[in-house]
């Protein structure tokens, strides 16, 4: 099935994601979503001169996006499973890929940021907010949970990462002070 | 469905594709529009990025490189500073950040091999150390000088006596503060004698030796006249090496050096008067002199110490050691050694 048609199906009938039969072309569409989203993110970051040019640089971003989403999908599925909610981890991963199509919006946003219409970071945050919103909607279709639980499960890996990063930062700061004094 | 309910099928009619609802058609249209817009903006973004990258690459070519060449060169060239602080020893650990003579010698070699480094300043603040360790640094300086022809400048801080001066004698210029304590050209071998103490506590040491000098320097008994003679010969030989190094480095006759080398200490100013120091000044004076000798002029760019990893590990290591514990173990270390060291510090 044409990825556009699968995408259209998911937009019009998101409940198809949780149907017994997997929507046709979901795998292709999800993976293409990661690719398109990474292209959008890469081009946006290149326009901000935040990352180096070249194919290896793009592949690094793609690898990062794929591995982060794989990890996030795994953690979320584990959380859902532990709280007694049934669902499919592979469909969740592919659904995340479908939500990553929204990152393609970063390309025109890169131009807007170049025209000084809002800061680049704000555009990035807006786009990520849209991705999170889409993911919440998709997760609700894939696992029969409330909006709050879907939001919690989406934020869980991010919160975990932030907590680890914050703890490491605080520890590093304390360690540095201990070294200097 | 309609065909089934009607019960009649028109064989000539083409089967109709199921009609999409209006909402689905709208979504499909929007997706197609977004895809086209994405493709367009992607193309535009690639053009912008490619042009920006190309402009960045060609920018230096449009500029007058001849003007920039001197500037970039001047910014790149530097004077390196190697710090030699504290007693000089070989270092008895496998930690690469331990500031033993091997690490200092390695650092000197690395800096001398760098193209950007035009001169090296040794910032010396040490009362000296063991003969082998001091000679290792001395030898590294001599080798680097012979291989690279780069000037070496010794800068004396608070104290640069004995082994510190030995190291400095390999340099092309010696700069000292007027109040620096230097000199103490000589060798020392000291051994503790715990015989009386051990008798009091009822401890006795028995040595079974392959030769009569095998336990020379033992702290458990008095030194014999023969041992003293042998050690004196060794000290004299090390002393001759020190005098020869100073004589060669300072371009002074051996007899003249010997007159100065009775172990006494000098202030920087006294040392300057008797030819052991070339110039009185501080670190900036030493850096300026190094810049001029290296052909990059006064107030040169300074390349400071060393590998950041080694620095941070060294800092952490010193913090992790119990306060004063290392100093205590060092003080308790009774093994005798021949040293170019001044113990007045």
Image (tube, coloured by chain):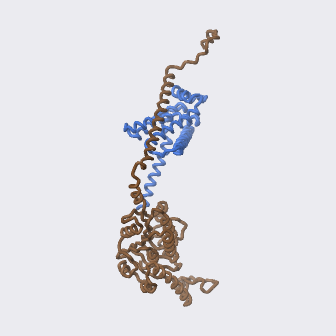
Please say if A32 is above or below B328. above
Q: Does residue A106 appear in the picture of this structure?
A: no
The one of A33 and A76 positioned closer to us in this rendering: A33
Q: Is residue B226 left or right of residue A111?
A: right
Kindly indicate which chain is depicted in brown in the rendered structure: B
Give the x, y percent position of residue A121: 41, 41
Give the x, y percent position of residue B243: 47, 82
The one of B338 and B199 positioned closer to us in this rendering: B338
Q: Quadrant of residue B76?
A: bottom left
Q: Quadrant of the C terminus of chain B?
A: bottom left
Give the x, y percent position of residue B110: 50, 65
Please say if A77 is above or below B225. above
Give the x, y percent position of residue A84: 56, 36
Q: Quadrant of residue B289?
A: bottom left
Please say if A29 is above or below B178. above
Count numbered badges in the picture. 0
Q: At 43% from the left edge and 56% from the top edge, which residue is drawn?
A: A174
Q: Does residue B1 appear in the picture of this structure?
A: yes
Q: Colour of chain A?
A: blue
Q: Quadrant of the N terminus of chain B?
A: top right
The one of B285 and A151 positioned closer to us in this rendering: B285
Please, which residue is most extreme toward the bottom here? Answer: B225
């Amino acid at each position: 099935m044409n990825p556009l048609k699968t995408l259209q199906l998911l937009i019009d009938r998101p409940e198809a994601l949780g149907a017994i039969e997997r929507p046709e072309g979901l795998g292709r569409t999800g993976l293409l979503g990661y690719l398109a989203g990474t292209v959008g993110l890469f081009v946006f970051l290149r326009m901000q001169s935040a990352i180096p040019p070249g194919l290896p640089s793009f592949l690094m971003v793609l690898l990062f996006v794929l591995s982060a989403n794989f990890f996030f999908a795994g953690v979320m599925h584990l959380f859902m499973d532990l709280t007694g909610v049934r669902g499919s981890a592979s469909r969740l991963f592919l659904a995340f890929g479908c939500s990553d199509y929204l990152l393609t919006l970063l390309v025109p946003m890169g131009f807007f940021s170049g025209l000084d219409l809002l800061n680049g970071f704000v555009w990035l945050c807006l786009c990520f907010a849209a991705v999170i919103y889409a993911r919440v909607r998709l997760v609700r279709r894939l696992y029969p949970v409330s909006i709050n639980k879907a939001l919690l499960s989406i934020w869980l890996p991010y919160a975990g990462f932030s907590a680890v990063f914050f703890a490491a930062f605080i520890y590093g700061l304390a360690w540095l002070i201990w070294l200097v004094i | 469905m309609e065909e089934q309910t009607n019960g009649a099928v028109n064989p000539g009619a083409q089967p109709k594709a199921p009609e999409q609802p209006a909402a689905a058609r709208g979504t499909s249209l929007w997706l197609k529009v977004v895809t086209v817009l994405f493709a367009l903006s992607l193309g535009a973004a690639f053009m912008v990025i490619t042009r920006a990258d190309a402009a960045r690459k060609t920018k230096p070519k449009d500029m007058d490189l001849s003007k920039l060449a001197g500037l970039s060169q001047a910014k790149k060239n530097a004077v390196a500073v190697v710090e030699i602080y504290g007693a000089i020893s070989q270092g008895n650990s496998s930690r690469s950040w331990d500031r033993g003579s091997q690490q200092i010698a390695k650092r000197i070699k690395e800096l001398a091999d760098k193209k950007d480094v035009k001169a090296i300043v040794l910032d010396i603040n040490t009362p000296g150390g063991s003969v082998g360790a001091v000679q290792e640094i001395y030898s590294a300086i001599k080798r680097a000088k012979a291989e690279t022809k780069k000037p070496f400048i010794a800068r004396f801080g608070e104290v640069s006596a004995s082994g510190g001066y030995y190291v400095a004698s390999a340099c092309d210029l010696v700069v000292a503060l007027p109040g620096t304590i230097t000199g103490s050209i000589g060798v020392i071998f000291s051994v503790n004698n715990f015989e009386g103490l051990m008798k009091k506590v009822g401890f006795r040491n028995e040595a079974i030796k392959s030769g009569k000098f095998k336990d020379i320097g033992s702290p458990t008994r008095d030194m014999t006249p023969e041992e003293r003679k042998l050690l004196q010969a060794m000290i004299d030989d090390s002393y001759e090496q020190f005098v020869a190094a100073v004589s060669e480095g300072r371009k002074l006759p051996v007899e003249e050096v010997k007159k100065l080398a009775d172990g006494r200490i000098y202030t920087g100013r006294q040392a300057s008067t008797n030819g052991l120091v070339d110039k009185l000044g501080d670190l900036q004076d030493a850096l300026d002199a190094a810049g001029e000798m290296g052909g990059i002029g006064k107030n040169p760019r300074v390349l400071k110490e060393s590998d950041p990893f080694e620095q941070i590990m060294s800092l952490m290591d010193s913090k992790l050691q119990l306060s004063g514990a290392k100093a205590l173990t060092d003080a308790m270390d009774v093994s005798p050694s021949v040293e170019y060291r001044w113990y007045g510090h």
